Image (spheres, helix red, strand yellow):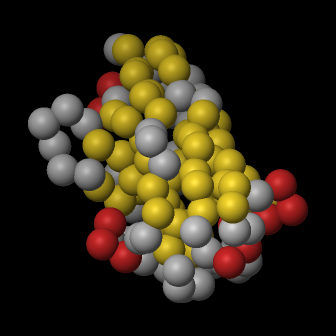
């Protein structure tokens, strides 16, 4: 098993940037493909980005493509989400997730472990 803890959220003005981190403990993160999801109040949890176990492939959802970048450092057991040009529509709780498979998944049902989430609030 792996335990995941997100950090880096906060309140920012539109147009600014944030970098989220997700640190794993227990099993090393290199055993897992990883993803980021977000959930806004009253909405379903939605896919944001995913990355393979070794980082050779990554995929960002259309609403964040060209603004957000997922990456990982297996040596530091850490997953990242660099978020640029933030807008109020990006306000949500952001979750990192790990899956036992090594390939990408864009659905929440493809993930086995979840962090507690970190709040991102973007003011206009």
Which corner quadrant holds the N terminus?
A: bottom right
Judge whether 32 appears above or below 38 on screen: below
Q: Nearer the viewer, residue 77 or 20?
A: 77
Q: Nearer the viewer, residue 75 or 4?
A: 4
Judge whether 45 appears above or below 16 on screen: below
Residue 80 in view, yes or no: no
Which corner quadrant holds the C terminus?
A: top left
Residue 97 in view, yes or no: yes
- Image location of residue 42, percent across then percent down: 13, 36
Give the residue drawn at x 20%, y 32%: 41
Give the residue drawn at x 48%, y 49%: 115
Task: Spot the residue most to the left.
Answer: 42
- Image location of residue 111, percent across then percent down: 41, 70
Give the residue drawn at x 58%, y 44%: 5
Judge whether 57 appears above or below 62 on screen: below
Left or right side of 119 for 24: right
- Image location of residue 105, percent across then percent down: 42, 77
Q: Nearer the viewer, residue 100 or 38?
A: 100
Left or right side of 34 for 13: left
Label count reads: 0
Give the residue drawn at x 67%, y 55%: 24
- Image location of residue 57, percent across then percent down: 63, 78
Left or right side of 36 for 4: right
């Amino acid at each position: 098993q792996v335990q995941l803890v997100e950090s880096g959220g906060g309140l920012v003005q539109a147009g600014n940037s944030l970098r989220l981190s997700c640190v794993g403990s227990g099993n090393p993160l290199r055993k897992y493909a990883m993803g980021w999801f977000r959930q806004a109040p009253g909405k379903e949890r939605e896919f944001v980005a995913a990355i393979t176990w070794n980082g050779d492939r990554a995929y960002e959802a259309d609403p964040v493509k060209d603004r957000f970048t997922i990456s990982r450092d297996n040596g530091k057991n850490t997953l990242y989400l660099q978020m640029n040009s933030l807008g109020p529509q990006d306000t949500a709780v952001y979750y990192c997730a790990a899956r036992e498979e090594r390939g990408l998944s864009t659905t929440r049902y493809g993930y086995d472990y979840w962090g507690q989430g970190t709040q991102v609030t973007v003011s206009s």
